[in-house]
Amino acid sequence: MRAGVGYDSHRFDETRPLVLGGVIIPNTPGLKGHSDGDAVAHAVTDAVLGAVGLGDIGAMFPDTDPAHEGADSIGLLAAAVRRLRDDGFHVGNVDVAIVTERPRIAPHADAMRERLAEALQVPATAVSIKGKSNEGLGWIGRGEGLAAIAVAAVAGAADGA
């Protein structure tokens, strides 16, 4: 087994829809970013890539490449998982914490679990989504944006799994 950690954060952007874990969250500003700004999918992608030593999302999908502008981040995650599988690895489980004052995460957690599980090629029970407040502290507490932290367990033939 191998473990990887991913982190991503973005400022809110009133001109975009909010996408988290592949789910559009209504009535909340979106996130700035080269792709769709999905901080959850970005953190999960970093976690699975990091677990197998493939760097981060920026190495695989550089934000300097116009082909990735406005990209569906769940699609990028699915491509990263295909790369892992091609190298003989598979995702075991993923745990995600979303740190934000708004929106409330719990009403959307199951839908996020389903979308992420599909991209990760695991059952939804292998994906955990938690919403956490920053208790009014710092830039997140002021409502300027949000952050996501992900941990992924990955196994593969090279690891004896």
Image: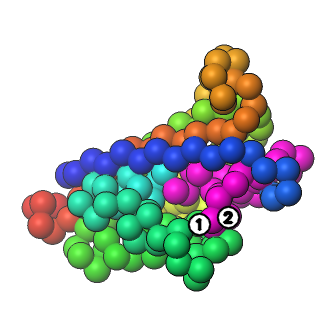
Name the residue located 46 percent from the left edge and 45 percent from the top edge: 7
- Please tell me which residue lies in front, 150 or 34: 34
Q: Residue furthest front?
A: 64
Q: Which mark is residue 112?
A: none
Q: Amino acid at mark 2?
A: Asp
- The earlier-in-sequence mark between 2 and 1 is 2
Whether pointer 2 and pointer 1 mark residues with C-beta atoms closer than 8 Å, the reply is yes
Q: Position of residue 73 (x, y in %)?
A: 59, 66
Q: Position of residue 139 (x, y in %)?
A: 66, 28
Name which residue lies at 44% across and 63% down.
Answer: 57
Give how far apart the Cα atoms at labels 2 and 1 are. Answer: 6 Å
The C terminus - image quarter: bottom left
| Magenta segment boundaries in residue numbering | 18-42
Q: Report whether residue 104 is seen.
A: no
Q: Is residue 11 left or right of residue 84?
A: right
Based on the picture, tell me whether residue 37 belongs to the magenta stretch: yes
Q: Which residue is mark 2?
A: 36
61 vs 36, left or right, is left
